[in-house]
Image (cartoon, rainbow, N blue to C red):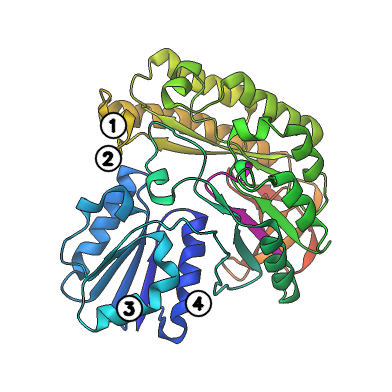
Amino acid sequence: MIFIKTYGCTLNKSDSQSMKYYLQDEITDSLDDADIIIFNTCGVKGQTEHKVLKDIAPYVGKKKVIVAGCLPLIHYSAIPENVEAIIGPDQIPKIASIVDSVRQGNKVREIKQTSCKPMPLPQVRDGVVAIVPVSLGCMGSCTYCATRFARGKLRSYALEDISREVSMLVEEGYKEFQLTSQDTGCYGIDIGTSLPKLLTTLAEISKDIRIRVGMMNPNHALMQLDELLEAFDAPNIYKFLHLPIQSGSNTVLETMNRKYNVEEYMFVVDAFKDRFTDLYLATDVIVGFPQETEEDFERSLDIMYRSFPDKVNITRYSARPGTISSKFPQFPDRIKKDRSRILSKIVHKHSLEINKRYIGKQLDALIVEKGKRGRCVGRLNNYKPVICDGKIGSFTKVMIKDATSTYLIA
């Protein structure tokens, strides 16, 4: 039997669901019952790599170990030499034959990226939420990013293929569709289409679904802003925008090679907030980036007050092998921790303030999964999570009675 442990982003979760499809009845949810463990890894941060390697170590030599995902292409030498297989994301369609080879006692080492036209992979999905990858790779060249070593340059799935998959999933009863990639904003640039065209097409498939658009970088949002706003007008697209700023300092953004500035980020945010008054804004911030001065960090704090995001993913910078920024002088961990703590305090306060504004309102929600204590998790029309009651897959009215910094309570 085979156990799969997944780390990292939504796209990695999608990859694991594809491996479950190819391996079918061999999958087990019990680690003890498994003779093979597939670690579908992430290597975006040093802290994540450390956790992955710590998790792998106890099973090397005791069970057959397959290391998959991004880490093999980011830091191959960090993986224990005596694991049975090391493979990359592009080897997922071959996972059944790789498992057979491992069972025969062979060592497998295959991480080569393919250059053929990407096709949506089948997945084993649970519940009413479907992850739908729209592209692989990205168009960026950020000085700190190692994920591009694993995922490569942009390769978009054909709009017709994505539309066909979503149509099929709607027929099967799925209600929420999470569009995911390294950067949804650059979807289609390589094949002569665009994210707004994709959203318009998918929104027409059914009124009784919700579509969540994954992270998009500000430069790609800006270049098609009017079309994006119009596409987001569709009532079945969550009014949710994940737009990473990474730093409030233009100097740091330039050193990161992020290809936009603070003013452009704010222009996109303001345009979305003007159009959608209930917008749920999520962003990402890296603290302790090499050469980030106290003044630079203060500007990152300032952008929190200016853009007032609902959610902020805070990352303490860690140097990744092969990246340009890994060669810069590095800050000690204490400075990164201090800056992270200061930013977290501000973010928590803002998030709680925003969520308390919902108290006393009756709103529509899609029930997407089971929660704790017999309750469920629903999503408002802007993707805001709410603890409520109801039948999974149904749309219902909820009265907001309380709020925390991360979710609402009906």
Query: Which range of residues does the magenta coloring cover?
Result: 175-185
Q: Secondary structure at mark 2?
A: loop
Please state which amino acid type lies under the numbered disc 1. Ser
Q: Earlier in the sequence, mark 2 or mark 4?
A: 4
Q: Are marks 2 and 3 in contact (CB under 8 Å)?
A: no
Look at mark 3 in the image and give the residue it sits on. Answer: 99
Distance (Cα) linking label 3 and label 1: 35 Å
**Residue 64 within the magenta-colored segment of the rendering:** no
Look at mark 2 in the image and give the residue it sits on. Answer: 321
Look at mark 1 in the image and give the residue it sits on. Answer: 326
Rendering quarter of residue 272: top right
Q: Secondary structure at mark 4?
A: helix
Query: In what quadrant of the picture does the C terminus appear?
Result: bottom right
Q: Earlier in the sequence, mark 1 or mark 2?
A: 2
Instruction: Give the left or right position of residue 250, taking residue 111 as reference.
Output: right
| Residue 379 position (above or below residue 227) | below
Question: How many C-alpha atoms fall within 10 Å of the one at disc 4: few (<14), some, or many (≥20)?
Answer: some
Distance (Cα) linking label 2 and label 4: 33 Å
